[in-house]
Amino acid sequence: MKASEMRKMSVSELNEKLKELKDELFKLRFQQAINQLENPMRISAVKKDIARVFTVLRDIELNGKDA
């Protein structure tokens, strides 16, 4: 998901998205531990999405929704 798409979301939607991404990352790490992970690059992609959500949330916190 792109940062521009995330900026259009509300804070509650971003928090829900963050929860989903963290859950997905947990599942991917579990699959990797038992050698059933098909696409190992998905872990880094999810980590980057989590970082994007945190960045957008911090931007909203500092500048407000309309900035």
Image: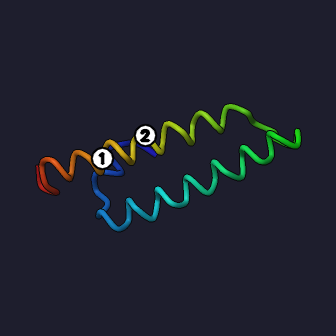
Mark 2: amino acid: Ala
From the top left corner, tell me how far across and down residue 48 is, in percent: 49, 36
Q: Secondary structure at mark 1?
A: helix
- The type of residue carrying mark 1 is Val
Would you call the spot at circle 2 few (<14 residues within 10 Å), some (14-19), or many (20 or more)? Answer: few
Q: Earlier in the sequence, mark 2 or mark 1?
A: 2
Judging from the image, the colouring scheme is: rainbow
Q: Is residue 45 left or right of residue 3?
A: right
Residue 5 in the image, given as x and y percentages of width and height: 35, 50
For the residues bearing labels 2 and 1, Cβ distance under 8 angstroms: no
What is the distance, in whole Å, between disc 2 and disc 1 at their CAs? 9 Å
Which residue position holds label 1?
56
Q: Which residue is mark 2?
A: 51
**Which residue is farthest right?**
35
Q: Position of residue 19 (x, y in %)?
A: 51, 60
Q: Is residue 58 left or right of residue 16?
A: left
Number of numbered discs overlaid on the protein picture: 2
Q: Is residue 24 above or below residue 10?
A: above
Tell whether 16 sits left or right of 63: right
Q: Residue at x 29, y 51 (%)?
A: 57
In percent of width and height, residue 58 lies at 26, 47
In this view, the residue in front, 22 or 14, is 22
At x 40% / y 62%, what residue is drawn? 15
Question: Which quadrant would residue 38 be assigned to in this image?
Answer: top right
Toward the viewer: 61 or 37?
61
Look at 30% across and 46% down and name the residue there: 56
Local SS, label 2: helix
Image point 39% across, 48% down: which residue?
A: 53
* Disc 1: CA contacts within 10 A as few (<14), some (14-19) or many (>=20): many
